[in-house]
Image (cartoon, rainbow, N blue to C red):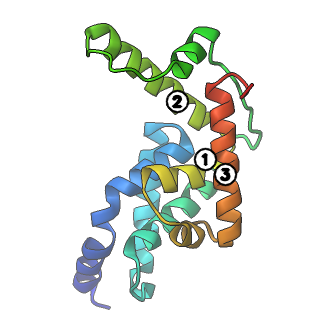
Amino acid sequence: MDDTSDQDRFAEVFLPHLVDAFRLARWLAGSRIDAEDIVQEASLRAFKAIRGYSGGDSRAWVLTIVRNTSYSWLSKNRPSAVVLTEDLDQGARDRIDRPAGAEEETPETVLIAKLEAQEIRKAVTALPIPFREVLVLREIHGLDYRAIAEVSAIPIGTVMSRLARARRLLLAAVSGGGS
């Protein structure tokens, strides 16, 4: 065993994607502290499996490990029930629905934009994990359907249908039911 070459390969394959790993773990876990634990465990798993990495898309390989680690960590440390909440008030819905204008940037508009971003983040976090996962991989990590299918270990058609449903659920959450 050559630990030095394993360390070099780990640094070459895993470490460039550490930020993406943390972002995915945070979105799946919904907590910075939990995401740190998940990424630490995923890093250990990746290091142990680095000899089995056969090349290809290293980002997809890393995110697959993080995804699987997230689900196993969450199943051990969180209750299995998922509760959906639609906690946006009418004022927040109205702000999101208003047409985008050429508003001048003032402290008020900056604060409103920040609040809207928090509301959308909250709505994404409230999505069921399978839908949140594909939405985050596509919209935040910018993965294509094929890479999402590889990371999630699901058919590409399932990726497409989950992504469409995730977008519909998100739209309904931020617009007050989509009506």
Q: Name the residue under label 1.
A: 132
Rounded to the nearest angstrom, the CA distance separating label 1 from label 2 is: 12 Å
The image's mark for residue 59 is none
| Residue 148 horizontal/vertical position (percent) | 55, 66
Above or below, 103 against 53 in this view is above
Q: Name the residue under label 2.
A: 120
| Residue 86 horizontal/vertical position (percent) | 69, 23
Image quadrant occupied by the N terminus? bottom left
Q: CB of mark 3 within 8 Å of CB of mark 2?
A: no
Q: Nearer the viewer, residue 151 or 65?
A: 151
Q: In which quarter of the image is residue 43?
A: bottom left
Q: What element carries label 2?
A: helix
Identify which residue is drawn at 71% across, 29% down: 178
Going from N to C along the chain, the mark reached first, 3 or 2, is 2
Three-letter amino acid code of the residue under disc 3: Ala
Three-letter amino acid code of the residue under disc 2: Ile
Image quadrant occupied by the C terminus? top right
Q: Which of 60 and 88 is in front in this view?
A: 88
Q: Mark 3 points at which residue?
A: 164
